[in-house]
Image: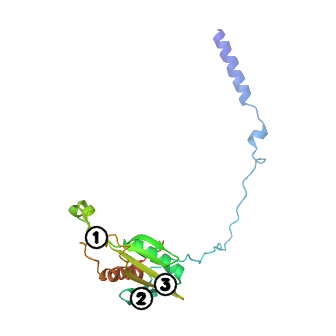
Amino acid sequence: MSVIVKSLLLIGFLVSCGTTEESRYRDTEALERPPTVISSTAKEQRTVDDSSIPKKKDITGLGSDVYQNTPTQLTIKQPFGEAWNTLGRALKQSGIKITDHERDKGQYYVTQDTADRTSFFAKATAFLSDDPTIYLLTVKDDGEETTVTATMANATEQSSAAKDDMPQPSAEGAEDLLQVLFKTLRDKLEEE
């Protein structure tokens, strides 16, 4: 019987709590409301950025800004400082090794390995081959232009020239070297 009494008391308590009529819980007029958005019939004004980023040159190389005077001389239409840097980039891109350089004298000492080193046998016997010929590139300022001449370095600068049984390199190598540089400068020179 005590269970029934306790149950009735609990039901009475719950009913009394649920019948409270307070207007603050039922009236939502006092609550904050979001603002109303008024849409206009006019379209939004959008700004379009018409400026452009300058594109890199589509053409690689100097084009007509370099020309060949003789088989062993070419001219770059740049002042000495720019031409010196341009020639250095062209040497690297052509795969021509710079052994030494003297900017104040305007001289690059370079070697060009013309031997085919692609086969396994050629790579394995490369240490037995001759020292490559050293060429001298002379860069001279000529106002707004710069001339580049190619010659073989003198006998004291040639490491293989001291050997008597080795044939002396021909002057055609200097012409070939300058021709490779000319093609790189004119057609293939890439910006850094």
User: Is residue 138 among the parts visible in the rendering?
Assistant: yes
Which residue is drawn at the image coordinates 41% and 71% (left, top)? 92
Give the residue number, with chain letter if any, for mark 3: 140
Q: Is residue 154 left or right of residue 15?
A: left
Q: Is residue 179 left or right of residue 165?
A: right
- Residue 78, image x, y percentages: 51, 84
Q: Residue 163: which disc?
A: 1
Local SS, label 3: strand
Q: Is residue 119 left or right of residue 89?
A: left
- Residue 178, image x, y percentages: 37, 82
Q: CA distance from mark 2 to mark 3?
A: 15 Å
Give the label, 2 or 3, closer to the camera: 3
Q: Nearer the viewer, residue 144 or 61?
A: 144
Give the residue number, with chain letter if any, for mark 2: 67
Q: Is residue 175 left or right of residue 37?
A: left
Q: CA distance from mark 2 to mark 1?
A: 37 Å
Q: Residue 155: which disc?
A: none
Give the label, 2 or 1, closer to the camera: 1
- Residue 181, image x, y percentages: 38, 79
- Please state, as top left, top right, bottom left or bottom right, where the N terminus lies in the image: top right
Local SS, label 2: strand
Q: Amino acid at mark 1?
A: Lys
Q: Nearer the viewer, residue 13 or 40?
A: 40
Instruction: Say which label, 3 or 1, has the lower sequence index.
Output: 3
Query: Is there a contact, CB below 8 Å, between mark 2 and mark 3?
Result: no
For label 1, the crowd category at 10 Å Cα-Cα, with few meaning under 14, some 14 to 19 and many 20 or more, is: few
Q: Amino acid at mark 2?
A: Tyr
Q: Amino acid at mark 3?
A: Lys
Pick out the residue farthest to the top. Answer: 1
Local SS, label 1: loop
Residue 153 vertical placement versus 7 (above, below): below
